[in-house]
């Protein structure tokens, strides 16, 4: 069944339990670990002062408990699942060939989450920590236990990135010996999603795995998606102090990309497409081994070794002519030849962490330190002429326009220490040393118009960077559940592979491109008042130097340092339990309301665009929600508002090719509900974008465009879950 502007989704979830005898019941142990990690409140909480081998004292953190949220998890609705985090700006590309929506905070670049350190179970899942940090894969939300956010410079324990860190922690198996969960999702536009997981604990072994298959014809024309993802983990506890683990993550997908639109095409029909021959595949493979050892009750260490073996393959009718030039049959009754691109990623990362509690006088102190060694290789081949066919065909009929090899070697050392002064006040200084060596080898297209040589040859060009970053966190505990915090951190963003090579024929690269850096400052108050109020009010200051952006001149997109920018603002979150909080009676159920709001003033303070607003930096982002629960019924309604922003640093209002211009403000309403019968059956229903608003969040010169990338209209879903 199809609906023109709507998507109807039906979900059936079946959970089967098998019970076996076991020597040890580990459910209590698992419960204790969760309590020590974070403090939950209606599905959202904060990390405690330290967890594992990481210090969080004085940092701005949030934790979302996914199973406690009423949201559309079957299709990873980013706005509804993680929209409670203040200031979250989302680039929605799921309708146009890229299923992992990009995110950012504080006026930073949200495209493919390039300024955010993206992790799963504590290890990096993007192609490369520095060279190609775009997020092509995120796990299905049905498999995620919780999501942790670190703001600012993501703390010195994770790296120098400016935009912070997000970590998806997957479920790790039930405390019983064997559990199977299977979920089947069907809907309009020929959408079918199947998710099945198994997990359990037997003696000293704990295991978990899932397999997800999704087919989706798409909300827009020519936007088919075919995806298979899987995960498996096994943990072995030879002793009560030692745990060994091994994990594998795999993704296979085939995505049709409908291309971008001009403003006039978007206003005419945002579901139309000017491209039918664009295809993408991004097979992803990650293997991670880990060791955790508790030396004693005060000291522990961990080692994570991760190997990534992935690629991105693309055949498309590229940007020539822009989105207004439709891909039509030529007079000789054939299409024009497409362009073929390949990128191959190989990277390995090893992170060792150590934490110990010790006494200084009569006061407990905490030291955390670690070392990271990472090596990565990228082969980028692009600009070869492909066939005139319409299907997914990577056959090339000409030499590569560019064939480059990039190598990255990174060594980092960090240390942080919580110095507690009395029972309420703590100071956490930290330092991080980074060594980064990059090598470029191969050839690429020559951008110089006056040159007779069509190629530029790079013969083992090397660049080495060594830098030290510092930071300090302050925290004062007003009560056990309320504190004042402040944090200052230095951060750094080196030039990436994407910055150094043009993706398509429109984009050009400034040969004098420089590394970027920033200073981050947070100050706020957060906490809980009994079971009534959960809040976090904070101010932030971000001084971004040598910001890398895109400038449009005479139809050419130049990637360059657009200047230094200053980002200042407020991030606030408050949630109030009205029923079963202020009003203690449970006769009418539980009712809470929350407000997540951020004001961001991001402005260029030096360079050619001094005084302009930073691109993709809406000044106001507001989300207001209501949670209601009565016995077995629960519901969430959320209103979202995102202010307008600019598509490039020049603050152009309009362009015929739609590559630059205003990104208008938009308001959306989402609703999700569930009802349980005898704790065995659960019925689900929800609507995303209830008012069917026409809007978009991205203008782009490159993939998946060029032009405006429309966002999805009204989506309706319903489902039933059965547990036995």
Image (tube, helix red, strand yellow):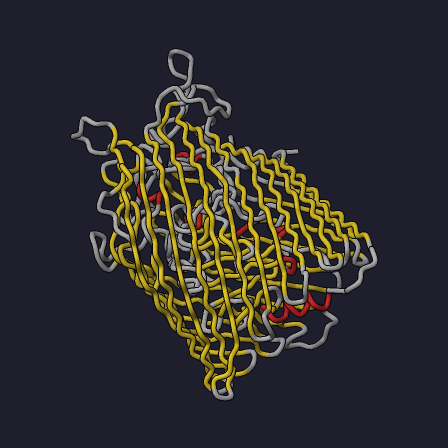
Instruction: Determine the residue positioned at 41% across, 34% down.
Output: 265
Query: Who is closer to the viewer here, 401 or 690?
Result: 401
Q: Position of residue 529 (x, y in %)?
A: 58, 78
Q: Residue 293: which quarter of the image?
A: bottom right
In the picture, measured across the screen, residue 280 lies left or right of residue 461, that is right
Residue 123 is left or right of residue 454, and the answer is right
| Residue 653, image x, y percentages | 30, 46
- Is residue 186 depicted above or below 387 in this figure? below
Relative image position of residue 121 (x, y in whole percent): 56, 56
* Residue 628 visible from this viewpoint: yes
* Count of marks, rendered view: 0
Residue at image position (36%, 21%) is 398
Task: Relative to 337, say whether 191 is above or below.
Answer: below
From the viewer's perspective, tell me whether residue 377 is left or right of residue 197: left
Residue at the location (49% across, 61% down)? 352
404 or 663: nearer the viewer: 404
Q: Residue visible at 40% across and 45% down?
A: 132
Q: Is residue 538 above or below residue 166?
A: below
* Residue 403 placement: quadrant: top left
Q: Is residue 82 visible?
A: no
Where does the image place residue 581, in percent across and percent down from the top left?
A: 64, 75
- Towards the viewer: 382 or 255: 382
Q: Is residue 200 left or right of residue 156?
A: right
**Farthest top residue?**
332
Image quarter where the N terminus lies is top right
């Amino acid at each position: 069944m199809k609906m023109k502007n709507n998507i109807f989704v039906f979900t059936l979830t079946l959970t089967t339990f098998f019970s076996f005898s076991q020597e040890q019941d580990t459910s209590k142990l698992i419960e204790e670990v969760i309590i020590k990690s974070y403090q939950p409140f209606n599905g959202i909480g904060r990390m405690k002062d330290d967890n594992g081998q990481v210090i969080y004292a004085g940092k701005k953190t949030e934790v979302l408990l996914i199973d406690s949220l009423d949201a559309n998890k079957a299709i990873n609705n980013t706005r509804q699942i993680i929209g409670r985090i203040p200031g979250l700006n989302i680039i929605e590309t799921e309708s146009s060939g890229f299923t992992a929506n990009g995110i950012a905070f504080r006026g930073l670049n949200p495209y493919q989450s390039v300024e955010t350190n993206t992790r799963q179970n504590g290890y990096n899942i993007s192609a490369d920590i520095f060279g190609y940090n775009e997020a092509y894969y995120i796990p299905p939300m049905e498999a995620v236990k919780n999501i942790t956010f670190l703001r600012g410079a993501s703390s010195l324990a994770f790296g120098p990135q400016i935009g912070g860190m997000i970590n998806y922690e997957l479920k790790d198996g039930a405390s019983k010996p064997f559990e199977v969960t299977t979920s089947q999702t069907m809907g309009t536009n020929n959408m079918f999603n199947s998710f099945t997981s198994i997990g359990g604990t037997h003696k000293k072994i704990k295991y978990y795995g899932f397999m997800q298959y999704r087919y989706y014809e798409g909300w827009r024309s020519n936007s088919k998606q075919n995806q298979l993802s899987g995960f498996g983990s096994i943990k072995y506890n030879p002793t009560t102090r030692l745990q060994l683990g091994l994990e594998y993550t795999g993704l296979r997908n085939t995505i049709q990309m409908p291309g971008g639109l001009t403003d006039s095409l978007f206003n005419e029909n945002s579901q139309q497409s000017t491209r039918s021959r664009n295809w993408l595949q991004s097979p992803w493979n990650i293997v991670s081994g880990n060791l955790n050892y508790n030396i004693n009750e005060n000291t522990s260490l961990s080692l994570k070794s991760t190997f990534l073996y992935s690629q991105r393959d693309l055949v498309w009718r590229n940007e020539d002519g822009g989105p207004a030039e439709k891909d039509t049959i030529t007079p000789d009754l054939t299409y024009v030849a497409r362009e073929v691109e390949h990128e191959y990623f190989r990277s390995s990362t090893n992170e060792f962490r150590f934490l110990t509690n010790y006494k200084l006088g009569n006061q407990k102190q905490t030291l955390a330190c670690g070392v990271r060694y990472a090596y990565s290789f990228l082969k980028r081949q692009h600009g070869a002429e492909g066939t005139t066919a319409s299907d997914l065909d990577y056959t090339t009929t000409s030499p590569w326009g560019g064939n480059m090899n990039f190598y990255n070697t990174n060594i980092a050392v960090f240390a942080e220490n919580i110095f507690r002064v009395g029972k309420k006040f703590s100071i956490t200084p930290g330092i991080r040393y980074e060594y980064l060596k990059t090598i470029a080898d191969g050839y690429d297209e020559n951008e110089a118009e006056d040159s007779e040589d069509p190629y530029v040859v790079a013969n083992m060009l090397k660049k080495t960077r060594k830098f030290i970053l510092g930071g300090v966190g302050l925290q004062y505990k007003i009560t056990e559940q309320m504190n004042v915090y402040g944090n200052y951190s230095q951060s750094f963003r080196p030039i990436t592979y994407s910055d150094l090579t043009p993706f398509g024929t429109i984009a050009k690269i400034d040969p004098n491109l420089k590394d970027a850096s920033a200073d981050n400052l947070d100050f706020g108050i957060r906490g809980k008042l009994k079971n009534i109020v959960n809040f976090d009010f904070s101010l932030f200051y971000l001084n971004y130097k040598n910001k890398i952006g895109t400038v449009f001149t005479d139809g050419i997109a130049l990637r360059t340092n657009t200047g230094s920018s200053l980002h200042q603002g407020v991030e606030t979150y408050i949630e109030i339990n009205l029923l079963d909080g202020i009003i203690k009676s449970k006769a009418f159920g539980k009712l809470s309301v929350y407000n997540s709001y951020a004001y961001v003033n991001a402005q260029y303070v030096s360079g050619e665009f001094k005084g302009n607003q930073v691109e993709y930096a809406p000044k106001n982002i507001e989300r207001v929600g209501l949670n209601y629960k009565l016995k077995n019924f629960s519901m969430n309604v959320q209103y979202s508002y995102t202010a307008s922003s600019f598509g490039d640093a020049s603050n152009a209002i309009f362009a015929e090719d739609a590559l630059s211009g205003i990104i208008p403000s938009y308001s959306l309403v989402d609703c999700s509900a569930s009802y349980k019968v005898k704790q065995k059956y659960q019925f689900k229903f929800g609507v995303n974008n209830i008012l069917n608003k026409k809007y978009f969040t991205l203008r782009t010169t490159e993939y998946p465009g060029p032009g405006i990338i429309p966002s999805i209209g009204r989506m309706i879903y319903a489902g039933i879950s059965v547990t036995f």
